[in-house]
Image: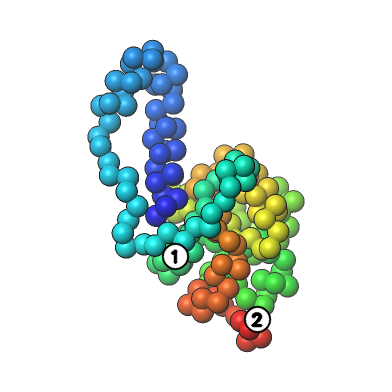
């Protein structure tokens, strides 16, 4: 739910952008004061387990992070499209249930993942990038998707390592993987 608040704010700003650009300063203030109040407190039923990231590091990202708890319930309820960008060998050892492996992140055609991403956008589900140990690859790929105009992109906080031992989420072909 932590990333959902950011998505909500971005969606509101995207819809109001043309109006705000044409409005004077006072009109813009009035526009925001007329919006209905919404409680933006974090939901109490979902613990926030996001890792602390320094501000300088956070500025490098182009999309929000999804906590492992939110990711878990979204995977369980099939409310997320998980795109695993780890190498195929690692994906074969263990992967998120119903995830799609897309190891060739330099391929901008996105042929293997275009349809699932369109379906996720149509259903208004987030598209979560599950990265490996190389955070720079995850950051670049997620940024590229955002720059292509794809809505709902987020990354799993901590990558695959953060959920590696959650047997309810992981499909393993090798028992040695969990050790």
Q: Which residue is mark 1?
A: 69
Residue in the image at 65% along x and 81% along y:
177
Tally of numbered tags: 2
The image quadrant that residue 23 belongs to is: top left
Where residue 93 sits: x, y (%)? 67, 77
Q: Which residue is mark 2?
A: 177
The image quadrant that residue 52 belongs to is: bottom right
- Quick one: label 1, few (<14), some, or many (20+) residues within 10 Å? some
Q: Is residue 66 above or below residue 60?
A: below
Q: Nearer the viewer, residue 154 or 59?
A: 59
Please tell me the numbered disc located at residue 174: none
Q: Is residue 136 above or below residue 68?
A: above
Where residue 86 sits: x, y (%)? 68, 64
Q: Nearer the viewer, residue 150 or 1?
A: 1
- Viewport quadrant of the C terminus: bottom right
Q: Is residue 3 above or below residue 173?
A: above
Where residue 105 sits: x, y (%)? 71, 54
Q: Is residue 77 left or right of residue 165?
A: left
Q: Is residue 28 above or below residue 149?
A: above
Q: Is residue 147 left or right of residue 136?
A: left
Q: Secondary structure at mark 2?
A: helix
Q: Please report whichever mark, 2 or 1, sits nearer to the chain's N-terminal start.
A: 1
Residue in the image at 44% along x and 32% along y:
14
Q: Secondary structure at mark 1?
A: helix
Residue in the image at 74% along x and 51% along y:
106
**Coloring scheme used:** rainbow
Q: CA distance from mark 2 to mark 1?
A: 21 Å
- Quick one: label 2, few (<14), some, or many (20+) residues within 10 Å? few
Residue in the image at 57% along x and 43% along y:
55
């Amino acid at each position: 739910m932590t990333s959902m608040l950011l998505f909500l704010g971005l969606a509101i700003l995207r819809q109001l952008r043309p109006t705000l650009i044409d409005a004077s300063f006072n009109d813009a203030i009035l526009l925001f004061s007329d919006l209905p109040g919404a409680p933006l407190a974090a939901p109490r039923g979902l613990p926030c387990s996001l890792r602390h990231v320094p501000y300088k590091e956070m500025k490098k990202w182009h999309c929000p992070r999804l906590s492992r708890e939110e990711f878990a319930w979204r995977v369980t309820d099939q409310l997320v499209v998980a795109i695993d960008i780890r190498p195929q060998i690692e994906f074969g050892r263990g992967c998120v249930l119903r995830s799609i492996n897309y190891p060739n992140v330099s391929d901008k055609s996105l042929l293997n993942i275009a349809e699932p991403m369109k379906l996720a956008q149509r259903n208004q589900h987030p598209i979560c990038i599950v990265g490996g140990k190389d955070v720079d690859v995850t950051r670049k790929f997620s940024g590229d998707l955002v720059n292509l105009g794809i809505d709902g992109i987020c990354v799993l906080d901590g990558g695959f390592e953060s959920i590696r031992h959650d047997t309810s989420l992981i499909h393993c072909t090798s028992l040695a993987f969990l050790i």
